[in-house]
Amino acid sequence: MSEQPQDESKDPAAAFTLKDLYDHHYHEVRPHASPHTHSDYETTLRHWKKYTANPKMGVLASQEKKDRRRFRIILQRFHGDLQTFGGMRETTANKYLRCVMALLNIAGPNGKGNPNGLDILPWVPALPRGTTPDPAPRQIEGVSLEAIYHACVMADWPTLRGVEPVDWWRALLVFLTLVGYRRSDWWNSLCWSDLSLDEGWVEKVERKTGKRERKPLFDCVVWHLRQFQTHRKYVFQSPKSKKRLYPQWNAIQREAGIPEPLYLFKDLRSTCGDNFYQIEPSLGQAALSHSSVAVTMRHYANPKRQRYEALKAAEDKLEIPPAFLKFAVVSDDAG
């Protein structure tokens, strides 16, 4: 476990704990943060207190190299303890570490790279070495989506009167691929009253952002939804237990011949964002209700595919030395 450093600072402002920084200054800098974002920071602070003994920020005001090095070690241990003692995946530990770094930056010096800094602390440590970037977004190719769609015929859950499981799953697959909702916005959450199947749109307050967004429903989405439209409150209603949702989703994928690791529901959202992103980056941003296209590009889209296709298409425009093209002459002669 991480140890608390000696707080030798005599600056009252630097006597704050990380929670003090959040309680007194976060809203000042991020007044429009969503409830979901606040929940992430509150969870981070609980973990921080548990694994670091909640050190005060005075060490960051110190000019002593040993104090600054000590705080970097605290950050590194925090990241490691989340995985070792908290049983978290590295990507989850990365998320909480980023929240810590965001709070430190708010308290740090104001400048070009930190325009929201409040100058409470004279410096802020860099992200500790040893943390790895989150994995690249996974998109599902069209062939795999086709296979999963046809494999939905084997589904035997959810068991709802008047609803065939195959129709439920196919509608969900089509809906998530083309609308891209988070699980919190569709599972026992999306109401039939949020939809207008006649006019072709869905509109609801998204839980993570707290914003009301309207999105189009393409004809194929509307058709699949009509196949099991009922008088129940929720569209994708099922017994609220992950014990059946994920095993059924995984069984459908295995029936479709999808190799391990199987896809997550988030990968359908990523596929939606990437498909729109490849047409126009701002469309990917709009499809996933992101505040910035950079968020879409980092976590959901695959700009590498766009760059690869652009480079590949440039072959005919390049001036390639004739000697390099000898293979083409040999192939023609052989033909």
Image: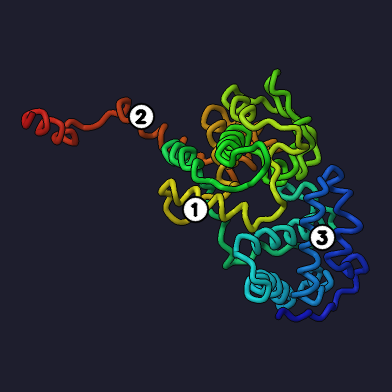
Kindly identify the residue that appears in the image at 90 percent across and 69 percent down: 11
User: Which is more toward the observer, 171 or 324?
Assistant: 171
User: Which is more toward the observer, 326 or 291?
Assistant: 291
Q: Is residue 258 above or below residue 61?
A: above
Give residue 42's mark.
3
From where the camera sits, is residue 272 visible?
no
Kindly identify the residue that appears in the image at 18 percent across and 33 percent down: 325
| Nearest to viewer (mark 2 / mark 3) | 3
> Which element carries disc 2, helix, strand or loop?
helix
Does residue 147 appear to the left or right of 73 in the view shown?
left
Q: Are marks 1 and 2 in contact (CB under 8 Å)?
A: no
Give residue 262's mark.
1
User: Mark 1 to mark 3: distance in Å?
Assistant: 31 Å
Which of the colour schemes (rainbow, by chain, secondary structure, one colour) is used?
Answer: rainbow
> Which element carries disc 3, helix, strand or loop?
helix
Q: Are marks 2 and 3 in contact (CB under 8 Å)?
A: no
- Could you say where residue 98 lies in the image, as x and y percent from the top left? 69, 58
Tag 1: residue type?
Answer: Leu
Find disc 2 in the rendering and name its residue: 314
Kindly identify the residue that appears in the image at 89 percent across and 49 percent down: 28
- Could you say where residue 58 lies in the image, as x and y percent from the top left? 84, 71
User: Mark 1 to mark 2: distance in Å?
Assistant: 34 Å
Where the N terminus falls, by quadrant? bottom right
Q: Residue furthest front?
A: 161
Q: Is residue 260 above or below residue 279?
A: below
| Nearest to viewer (mark 1 / mark 2) | 1
> Which element carries disc 1, helix, strand or loop?
loop
